[in-house]
Amino acid sequence: MNESKIILKKSLGEWFNMMTAGGYRVVGPVGQDGQIDFEPVTSPDAVRFDHVQTNNSGKWVMFPRYEAMMRFRLSGKEVQAGEIPPQAPPTVLFGAHPCDAASLATLNAVFTWDSSDAYFEPKLANTTIIGLSCTKGDSYCFCTSVGGGPGDTRGSDVLLTPLDGEKFLAEILTEKGKSVVGLAPQLFSAADGTSKEAALAKIPARFNHRDVTAKLPSLFPKEDVWKEQSLRCLGCGACAYVCPTCSCFDIQDERDRYTGVRIRCWDSCGFGLFTLHASNHNPRHKQSERWRQRVMHKFSYQPERLNVLGCVGCGRCSRSCPVDMNLGEHVAALAEIKV
Ligand code: SF4
Ligand code: SF4
């Protein structure tokens, strides 16, 4: 299914209101310059269209940063436990750039590869993605190096492309997309063959991701390469927390004396504690080994084992890094090394 329509920018507010009336929670890019994040939209006027990228990604809709899974109560030597069922409210994730929409394939591959994740899957199934093509990028973007592009339709149910500041081309790509457009069909008119290509940002490719995937096993033992790349890395984990494809989590019990809750929360391979054993042995005790793991996981292990890249080139990790580690530059440098 791929049908194209036109919707005017001034009609988006009415469309949003129809989504809310239709029972959807709408999540979109809101905030001030430099602090634009995916959050629940309380007013259509608050939605931003003029940013290169949000600080966070919309991944929390499917994979929350903190999620309660079970409550328990201790009584003597007895433990009473009760599962907390997954919450999966019908949601429209509005304004996800094509890199973020494409990231859902990576998350889905991770959360379904051996068994279905009972907390992730219903949220993804109940979420409709209204993507937003990119009309501008910055020096951190590298979607075209990892198989994406500023007008890539993968992962979106509807993809909007701003045409001239006044109207959007709406590509209706799935049944879910058809349903949200069907909430207000009067707002959409025929596209009459309108093309989006001239409106899209130009993002130059920096490396060939297939070459990088093929080369990484040979680079794994070259400790000097990883040490040189990671000298600045603080192990703060910011790169993982803003990343739309990072999926590592921890499960912890938070409790007072008699009651508690079991949660899962985001984790990061950049943390020294991530692989620390109870014996105090740490198989990745150097930051260079953690940086290597991050790159290998995204560009070697996931493509080989799950047939998806673990990176969509959104550039958030680099924009958020307090010491200006630039993943696009680092992977491009790896691609240049002769092995
Ligand atoms: S954000 Fe930068 S400093 Fe922090 S762990 Fe990631 S690469 Fe290292
Ligand atoms: S690793 Fe960096 S560039 Fe790649 S998807 Fe994650 S945040 Fe975006």
Image (cartoon, helix red, strand yellow):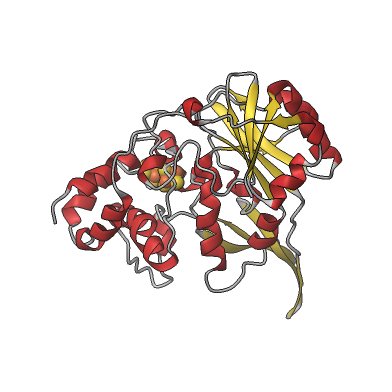
> Outermost residue, front direction?
192
> Outermost residue, bottom direction?
77
> Outermost residue, top direction?
165
The quarter of the picture where residue 286 lies is bottom left
Q: Residue 28 location in percent, x, y? A: 66, 36
- Work out which quarter of the rendered image holds the C terminus and state it: bottom left
Q: Residue 318 location in percent, x, y? A: 39, 37
Residue positioned 16% across, 49% down in the render:
337
Is residue 111 toward the left or the right of residue 318 in the image? right
Q: Which one is nearer the viewer's eye here, 149 or 87?
A: 149
Residue positioned 53% across, 56% down in the render:
105
Is residue 30 toward the left or the right of residue 305 in the image? right
Regarding residue 65, the answer to whether it shows in the image is: yes
329 versus 249 height, above or below: above
303 versus 178 height, above or below: below
104 versus 144 height, above or below: below
> Outermost residue, right direction?
21
Q: Residue 258 location in percent, x, y? A: 75, 67
